[in-house]
Image (tube, rainbow, N blue to C red):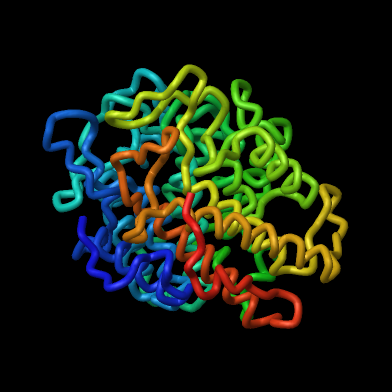
Amino acid sequence: MKVESTAHFHLLPIEERVRLSYQILERLRRPNGGYIASPYSAEDGSGDAYNVYWIRDIMFATYANEYLGCFDKMVESFRLVMDIFKRYHLRIIKASIVKPHVLHQRGGFMPARVHPTTLETITDDWGHHQLDVFGLFMYKTGDLIKKGYGFRFTTEDFTLISHIRNYIFNMGFEPDFGVWEEGPEAHSSSFGAVLGGLMMWFDQGFYDYKYRQKIDISHLVPVSERMIADGYSALTPLLPRESASRPYDLAQLSLIWPYNIVDYETKLTLLHNIENHLLGVRGVRRYPGDVYCGKGLIPHAGQSAEWPLGLAWLAISYAKLAEHGKDQRIDKQPVYLDWSERAEYFRKAVGYFHQLESVMTPDGYVPEMYVGSAVGHNTPLAWAQSFHIIAAQVILNLTHKHPEHFRLPNEVRRGGYATI
């Protein structure tokens, strides 16, 4: 994958680095609005091809468009995801009536990945029951409607979303394969994603702080108090763990952003656990004992791959803490953050953003992973590239809105800093 540039990525000012990063992301976008996960085609017969559509990856990859003001592109991507769901609508309806067996129901679930042109499933051989995909879809479609893009959705679309709601209710908050497609196990990141999606449509004020105008969508796809109560009853006992087998996991950062579904103390605990147990020099390990390292990389004994994606996610999470002067405790009582606390969170966000960019390639790619100093073959990784853009824009927005409190170091703003 070649990107034309006249200067080394790390020498460019931050606005140019964002522009180049977005050019790279755009080269992964296809005419129908989807994003292939990476350019890797596996033409040599080794490994799995990544130049296909993962539904989750499309939604997170297009997320960068919102932060750059390209809402039409984002809506187009979600319309494509809607079309993929419609192709497998019958599976959703069946599973919303009769619960399929998570391990032994071949073809009973939405496929996790599909062909980028035909949208046909690629394989049913492994765990496709991934609740977080449904949670992210419900969360972001509701969010887009509340931001004024409801005219892009039809009665047929809302029927589909209502069937997804029924699917979630019938499947329950039970074990799934999670963000990393491993399991089945009860995952707090999956339960939090689904709860975030349901809360978006429940519309009892939980996400009101995000919107300038109140747009009620609860009548379009009603969500009952029972579903919300079931979600919290499933999520709360798991926290701060990800699952019975994982005390902490990179995917738990989704509970902070985008869903903001956990209380302030839990956010700090999750960040502490990930920083103290999973953070590496070139990225964040997904979870303790992770053995996945892609094609051609051989880890040393006890070594796990480090994902630069995690650095972007940490930067976004801390920037979001800096963005708002108010949070809430587990008992729903408010927590007020003073400017010194918010400035410290901003400093940490910038630190992780700086670390992320120092491990990006000279062309501006965000690799899927490093094993030691070796770069993984899925480079660039679409949703990681998107997260780099989002992290940059959240940080820049804070500096523009509160210049007296949030300032970028010159080496981050102007470029020219050393790489790892």
Q: Which of 109 and 266 is in front in this view?
A: 266
Q: Residue at x 60, y 52 (%)?
A: 314
Query: Of residues 333 and 198, which is closer to you in this image?
Result: 333
Quadrant containing the N terminus is bottom left
Does 214 appear above or below 159? below
**Image quarter of residue 336:** bottom right
**Residue plotted at (65% across, 55% down):** 260
- Which x, y percent locates residue 190? 54, 39
Asked if residue 66 can be seen in this view, the reply is: yes
Residue 387 point in image, percent of width and height: 47, 58
**Marker count (numbered):** 0
The quarter holding residue 25 reads bottom left
Q: Where residue 289 appears, x then y in whole percent?
A: 53, 22
Between 301 and 63, the residue placed more toward the observer is: 301
- Is residue 141 depicted above or below 290 in this figure? below
Above or below, 179 against 358 in this view is: above
Q: Where is residue 247 in the image (x, y as percent from the top left)?
A: 65, 28
- Residue 65 located left or right of residue 43: right
**Observer-nearest residue: 280 or 166?**
280
Can residue 160 be seen in this snapshot? no
Q: Which residue is drawn at 34% across and 48% down?
A: 55
Q: Is residue 151 left or right of residue 231?
A: left
Image point 51% across, 63% down: which residue?
Answer: 417
